[in-house]
């Protein structure tokens, strides 16, 4: 047996043993959620974009059952956004490291005495041992998740969607046990944005330049397979400046800034803008056009219906952001964005300017 297969078998046996020891009943019926108060936990300890596309599902569950109090397990990077959601009771921050370091989180979850735990991490092919331990540590009898994946035996309420045309459809399916159906509801995220945050973002854009359109070019992705080589942004930025000579072009950076962004910004008279997540959300919402690899920025732009040019790996049709107007440009490599040539992105910039420029007053 090949070594990876042996490792996978060991991990599967480990998960199976945990479920047998701590999982309780393998299957439980759905109760009347209105009969008493219930406390639930939704696991979303991953990226900002993952939380963005889950917002309306969380809202739908809590609206359907006021008797249900819903907490959210978040990663350090998406916790700030989670705290702005008025229907979330408590945000528990958890950083995925070794299993040993997760012990304080497990103990905290056990003390909460949850009735329900929902696994929102549906974008991976298996329920890994870390997620399995988080689920079981709650002691919740109703353990809800998308079945059909390796180690899905941890779920006492497995969900089996017939089709998943878009990954958000799988997240929406998690609300099925609560009587929420996908029809007649807009699942595009409604991100809370205060008037003060919007005004501050407008002021930042105005400080950078009074001219429109406002073009936000995001260079970075937290996932290496979704990162595009930085040098390929140079001809894209040059074409944006050529086609939209009056544009205010901004490159967001982390609050500390970075030298690579400055080098790309200078030749095209763009500006680099250090932003935290709250500021980045408002800055994206007040842009006129966003160019970015698939990341939290693209899903934030989609939530505010900002035209969007997204760079994607091949075969990622299920993962595209919702768009009102935009282009998706795919790499030739299904494993990374390295196979995406700059010329293809430049051509997509031309198409977007041709399609939107006159109607939106960019030209």
Image (cartoon, rainbow, N blue to C red):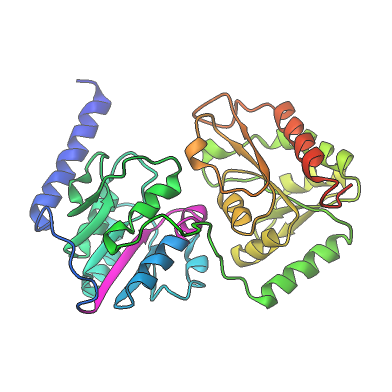
Q: In this view, does 360 lie to the left or right of 7?
A: right
Between 327 and 90, which is closer to the camera in this rendering?
Answer: 327
Q: In this view, does 140 lie above or below 223?
A: below
Q: In this view, does 161 lie above or below 346?
A: below
Q: Where's residue 279, x and y in %? A: 66, 66
Looking at this rendering, what residue extends furthest in the top direction?
Answer: 1
Q: Is residue 160 left or right of residue 260?
A: left
Q: In this view, does 279 lie above or below 228?
A: below
Looking at this rendering, what residue extends furthest in the front direction?
Answer: 184
- Residue placed at 82% from the left, 41% from the top? 240
Please give the range of residues in magenta.
36-55
Asked where in the image residue 357 lies, by quadrant, the reply is top right
Residue 237 appears in the rendering: no
Q: Where's residue 146, x and y in %? A: 29, 48
Number of marks drawn: 0
Between 112 and 202, which is closer to the camera in this rendering?
Answer: 202
Asked where in the image residue 38 lies, by quadrant, the reply is bottom left
Q: Where's residue 221, x and y in %? A: 58, 45
Residue 39 appears in the rendering: yes
Q: Is residue 6 above or below residue 252?
A: above
Q: Is residue 47 left or right of residue 141?
A: right
- Residue placed at 41% from the left, 48% from the top? 169
Q: Where's residue 151, x and y in %? A: 22, 42
Residue 74 falls within the magenta-colored stretch: no
Residue 38 falls within the magenta-colored stretch: yes
- Residue placed at 52% from the left, 72% from the top? 84
- Residue placed at 26% from the left, 58% from the top? 134
Q: In which quarter of the image is the N terminus?
A: top left
């Amino acid at each position: 047996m090949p070594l990876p297969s042996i490792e996978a078998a060991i991990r599967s046996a480990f998960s199976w043993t945990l479920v047998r020891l701590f999982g309780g009943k393998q299957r439980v019926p759905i109760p009347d959620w209105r009969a008493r108060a219930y406390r639930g936990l939704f696991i979303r300890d991953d990226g900002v974009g993952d939380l963005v596309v889950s917002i309306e599902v969380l809202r739908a569950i809590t609206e359907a059952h006021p008797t249900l109090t819903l907490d959210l397990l978040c990663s350090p990077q998406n916790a700030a956004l989670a705290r702005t959601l008025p229907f979330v009771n408590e945000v528990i921050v958890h950083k995925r490291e070794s299993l040993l370091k997760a012990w304080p989180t497990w103990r905290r979850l056990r003390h909460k005495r949850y009735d329900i735990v929902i696994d929102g991490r549906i974008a991976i092919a298996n329920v890994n041992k870390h997620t399995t331990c988080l689920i079981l540590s709650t002691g919740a009898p109703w353990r809800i998740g998308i079945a059909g994946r390796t180690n899905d035996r941890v779920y006492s309420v497995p969900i089996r969607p017939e089709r998943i045309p878009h990954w958000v459809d799988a997240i929406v399916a998690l609300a099925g046990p609560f009587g929420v159906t996908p029809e007649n509801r807009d699942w595009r995220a409604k991100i809370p944005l205060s008037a003060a945050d919007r005004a501050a973002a407008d002021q930042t854009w105005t400080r950078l330049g009074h001219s429109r359109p406002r073009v936000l070019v995001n260079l970075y992705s937290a996932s290496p397979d979704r990162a595009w080589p930085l040098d390929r942004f140079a001809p894209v930025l040059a074409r944006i400046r050529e086609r939209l000579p009056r544009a205010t072009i901004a490159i967001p950076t982390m609050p500390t800034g970075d030298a690579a962004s400055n080098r790309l910004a200078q030749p095209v008279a763009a500006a680099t803008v250090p932003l935290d997540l709250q500021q980045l959300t408002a800055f994206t919402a007040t842009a006129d056009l966003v160019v970015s690899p698939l990341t939290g920025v693209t899903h934030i732009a989609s939530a505010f219906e900002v035209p969007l040019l997204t760079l994607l790996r091949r075969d990622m049709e299920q993962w595209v952001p919702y768009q009102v107007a935009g282009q998706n440009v795919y790499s030739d490599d299904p494993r990374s964005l390295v196979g995406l040539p700059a010329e293809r992105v430049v051509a997509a910039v031309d198409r977007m300017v041709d399609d939107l420029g006159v109607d939106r007053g960019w030209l």
